[in-house]
Image (cartoon, helix red, strand yellow):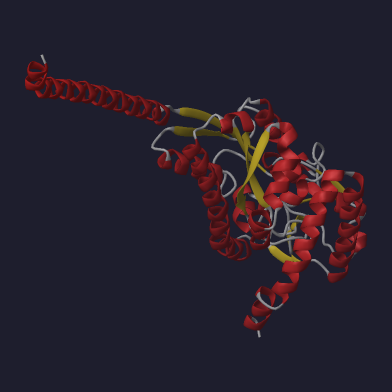
């Protein structure tokens, strides 16, 4: 019995080992197939997500395709379409096409449109701190605004202020220092401000009213007729490039500078939060990058176009270019400082924004005294 066992036991052992190897191999192959199928499934999910398309509407506060202001949102839409390879398309509507120009914020908040393009100071009735994110009188230049928003905490505060309205803001353009505006009467002293009806929005309008004038808020599409018919005596708009396109030189005689009320006005791209969060992460990043592009591109365009337009106005249209008197500028500056402090005292969010803005403004002004300002002064020697 033992002899028989000893003779066949190695064979049996080998057969058992072979069977074990075979079964193990089959299990490995089966697991490998499951992994491959799983990976293919994951890839299919990713592919399906990347192939999903989004079609957005953007409402604006500007006339459709208006030079600079109106073309900036068009440029954003073009860039985002190209970057996303058509996965996200944005159709741009001018003021009044879907909603009135000054209803853009509400339309985006409520989801009537996924995006909007305008200026934050239009919404100061809803958000007292909002003018800081466009421009305040004697405030930051375009370069300084970009620094505060993107590296000084301004953008985070902007988003905090807009959060209750289900809106995410991005900087979406800048005109650079504007002009003081078009007037149908000369300004030689503060007495000439009294009783003057002028279209000037935001904090600039509040300051102008405190100085004895009457501030009016009107969309750009109504400025020409209002100035022509005497509804207003003066208007600020932007700068030579835009002002000439609107034809303001045809209905006003005097063109005053500098734009004390808007030294570096930032335009905004606002997005409905739910719409933004519905995008996959890569499209969200593309929106962010396209906004930064649009923000810088607008400033570049205005810098290049304003001088040629100013020369045209003076040479071919007999525009009288005037500088506001120093005593007028000093009085407006004083009124502006007083107003900003009052706003900060009346609204907690405005106080938080003002504290950040004030600290940054004081610091950057100190540096620019020996950099930008010093160089420009030296260049004019």
Q: Give residue 184's position: percent from left, percent from top.
A: 79, 55
Q: Is residue 275 visible?
A: yes
The outermost residue toward the bottom is: 381
In which image quadrant can residue 249 be found? bottom right
| In the foreground, 283 or 321 | 283
Residue 33 sits above or below residue 168 on the image: above
Q: Give residue 328's position: percent from left, percent from top.
A: 87, 65
In which image quadrant can residue 148 be found? bottom right
Quarter containing the C terminus:
bottom right
Q: Is residue 137 visible?
A: no
How many dots with numbers?
0
Residue 348 sits above or below residue 97 on the image: below
- Residue at the (76%, 45%) spot, across then down: 130
Q: Is residue 65 left or right of residue 105?
A: left
- Residue at the (53%, 62%) spot, across then down: 304
Q: Is residue 303 left or right of residue 211?
A: left
| In the foreground, 259 or 57 | 57
Quarter containing the N terminus:
top left
Q: Give residue 274's position: percent from left, percent from top.
A: 61, 28
Q: Is residue 8 left or right of residue 293?
A: left
- Residue at the (88%, 59%) spot, across then down: 337
Q: Give residue 177's position: percent from left, percent from top.
A: 68, 61
| In the foreground, 209 or 117 | 117
């Amino acid at each position: 019995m033992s002899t028989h066992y000893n003779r066949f036991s190695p064979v049996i052992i080998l057969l058992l080992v072979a069977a074990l190897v075979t079964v193990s191999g089959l299990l490995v192959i089966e697991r490998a197939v499951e992994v491959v199928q799983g990976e293919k499934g994951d890839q299919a999910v990713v592919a399906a997500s990347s192939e999903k398309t989004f079609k957005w509407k953007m409402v604006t506060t500007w006339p459709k395709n208006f030079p600079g202001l109106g073309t900036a949102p068009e440029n954003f839409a073009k860039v985002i379409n190209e970057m996303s390879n058509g996965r996200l398309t944005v159709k741009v509507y001018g003021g009044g096409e879907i909603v009135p120009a000054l209803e853009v914020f509400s339309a985006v908040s409520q989801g009537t449109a996924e995006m909007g393009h305008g200026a934050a100071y239009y919404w100061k009735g809803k958000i007292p701190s909002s003018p800081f994110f466009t421009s305040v009188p004697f405030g930051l230049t375009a370069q300084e605004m970009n620094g505060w928003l993107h590296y000084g905490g301004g953008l985070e505060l902007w988003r905090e202020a807009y959060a209750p309205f289900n809106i995410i803001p991005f900087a979406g353009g800048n005109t650079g220092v504007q002009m003081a505006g078009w007037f149908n009467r000369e300004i030689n002293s503060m007495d000439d401000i009294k009783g003057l009806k002028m279209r000037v929005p935001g904090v600039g309008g509040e300051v102008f009213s405190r100085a004895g004038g009457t501030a009016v808020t009107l969309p750009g599409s109504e400025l020409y007729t209002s100035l022509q018919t005497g509804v207003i005596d003066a208007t600020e708009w932007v700068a030579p490039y835009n002002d000439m396109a609107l034809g303001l030189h045809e209905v006003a005689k005097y063109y005053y500078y500098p734009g004390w009320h808007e030294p570096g006005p930032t335009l905004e791209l606002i997005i409905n939060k739910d719409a933004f969060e519905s995008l996959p992460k890569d499209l969200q990043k593309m929106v962010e990058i396209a906004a930064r592009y649009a923000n810088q591109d607008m400033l570049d365009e205005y810098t290049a176009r304003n001088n040629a337009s100013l020369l045209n106005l003076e040479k071919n249209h007999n525009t009288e270019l005037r500088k506001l008197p120093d005593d007028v500028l000093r009085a407006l500056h004083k009124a502006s400082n007083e107003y900003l402090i009052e706003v900060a005292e009346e609204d907690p969010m405005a106080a938080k924004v003002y504290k950040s803005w004030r600290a940054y403004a004081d610091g950057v002004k100190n540096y620019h005294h020996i950099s930008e300002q010093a160089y420009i002064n030296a260049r004019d020697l």
